[in-house]
Image (tube, helix red, strand yellow):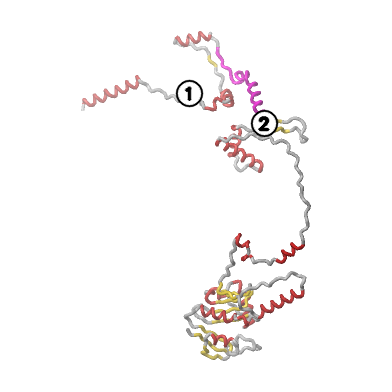
Amino acid sequence: MQANATWSTSDDDEDNSYIENNPRRAKRRKTNTGKAAAARQRVTRASTTISTLLDLFQHLPVICSAPETGNDGGNGNENENLGGSEKVYDGFESTMAGFLQEYLEARHGLWTSSSDTVLPDDDKGGGGGELLRPLSRFEIERILALEKRLVGRVAFSSEWIVLRKLHLQQERWRAGIRASPSLDIGPPAALTPLDVPPSTPIPQAVFDALRVIQTTQYEHSFAARIYGHKPQVTPGLIAVDWESHAPWTSLMDDIHAHYSFAHPEGEPTERQRMPITYVSLQPSHLRQVHDLLTRVFWEGIDVSDALHYAPERCTVIAMYGHLVVGAALLSSPQETYITYLAVKAGWESAQIATTMLYHLIALHPHRDITLHVSANNPAMLLYNRFGFKAEEFIAGFYEAYLDTHSRASKNAFRLRLRR
């Protein structure tokens, strides 16, 4: 234990003696040129430019050195060489006074050579003006830096345009894109007048031939092939009938033909044909359906609740364009009871009631269907053709609904279609 302690003490003495004989040296910082730089002095590549040189001289203090007396011979010899006089180094003004004027003239000449726009002294354009020079890279960077600090304070659109151009110029410099030299186009040459031949009148035969051409429907036209045609989808569509014709459509055809005969000087037009479409009940049909049921049966009928009980299975509405010409409704999918079946006046012989009843039965293939019908209603023949059979005769069934002057019987038959 004692030997170990003596050995450790000797090692500590050797370390201390090594540190005293070999003191640490301060690290020397190197610059871009590879030479050592003094402390607190920043040397960069831009230090060789005149602008940085001017800034350097502006911040350099005046260094004054007085004769010193020292014990060493070196200082004494140096003081003797100075002759015991005070050595003063000049500042910026005295140092740059000799060539500052030459530098300003050279800079002005450079700006003049790069300027190509002259601003006149007055609005008339007379007299000389001030030469405009392009901004330097340093000036652009300072303006953009100021613009970042003033975010949201640019009030005019012209200022935004100028800042945008400066940003583009900075991006060109970073990408190494040189500005293309301006091209002097010179004064515009005189324009040659265009020789337009006199217009000739279009023959009347051309207009006659164009009027003979019949208009093609858009879905069958060449424009539909180019731009595309999406056929209109009818909501709740069940069936479309192009063959049936009602007395009302025949009457409209006669009116159209009579008008064309009475006005022969007008252009002949063909009346547009439309099919009878069968759809399920939609909210847009309610007003016409209520009006139809009021005219056929009695007032106060409201079938708006049918929209909440699967209308695609319990309702069939006959439409001619946007006109409701028939309606057939079931109470609900669970209770398959036909509440109303009506056709608009003038559309009786178009097989509308037959078609609506057929689709109601087809929508419920495995359920019995029941209804009540007045004893003298001609619809009894229609129900018999579909297989409905009378189960019960009810006297006075419609007394609470029909008017006293109504020709319809107030007695009713209960019919059932067994499946």
Disc 2 marks a residue whose amino acid type is Ser
| Residue at the image position 61 percent from the left and 38 percent from the top | 166
Asked if the magenta segment contains residue 110, the reply would be yes
Residue interval drawn in magenta: 86-113
Quadrant (top left, top right, bottom left, bottom right) of the N terminus: top left
Asked whether 368 or 88 is in front, the reply is 368
Residue drawn at x 62%, y 88% is: 408
Q: Which residue lies at the image location 66% right of the left edge and 88% below the top edge?
A: 405
Between 56 and 346, the one lying in front of the other is 346
Residue 279 x/y as whole percent: 57, 74
SS of the residue at dot 1?
A: loop
Q: For residue 5, what is the image quadrant?
A: top left
Q: Position of residue 40 (x, y in %)?
A: 49, 25
Q: CA distance from mark 1 to mark 2?
A: 40 Å
Check disc 2 and report its element: helix, strand or loop.
loop
> Within the magenta stretch, is there residue 85?
no
Viewer-side label of 1, 2? 2
Quarter assignment of residue 14: top left
**Residue in front for this viewpoint, 398 or 418:** 418
Could you say where residue 148 lies in the image, as x and y percent from the top left? 58, 39
Is 320 above or below relative to 161? below
Q: Quadrant of residue 108?
A: top right
Instruction: Please say if 146 is above or below 38.
Output: below
Answer with left or right where residue 71 lies relative to residue 141. left
Which class describes the residues within 10 Å of circle 2: few (<14), some (14-19), or many (20+)? Answer: some
Q: Is residue 417 above or below residue 162?
A: below
Comparing 36 with 274, the one in front is: 274
Residue 100, percent from left and from top: 63, 21
Amino acid tagged 1? Ala
- Determine which residue is flagged by label 1: 37
Q: Which residue is mark 2?
A: 115
Is 393 left, or right, of 108 in this rendering?
Answer: left
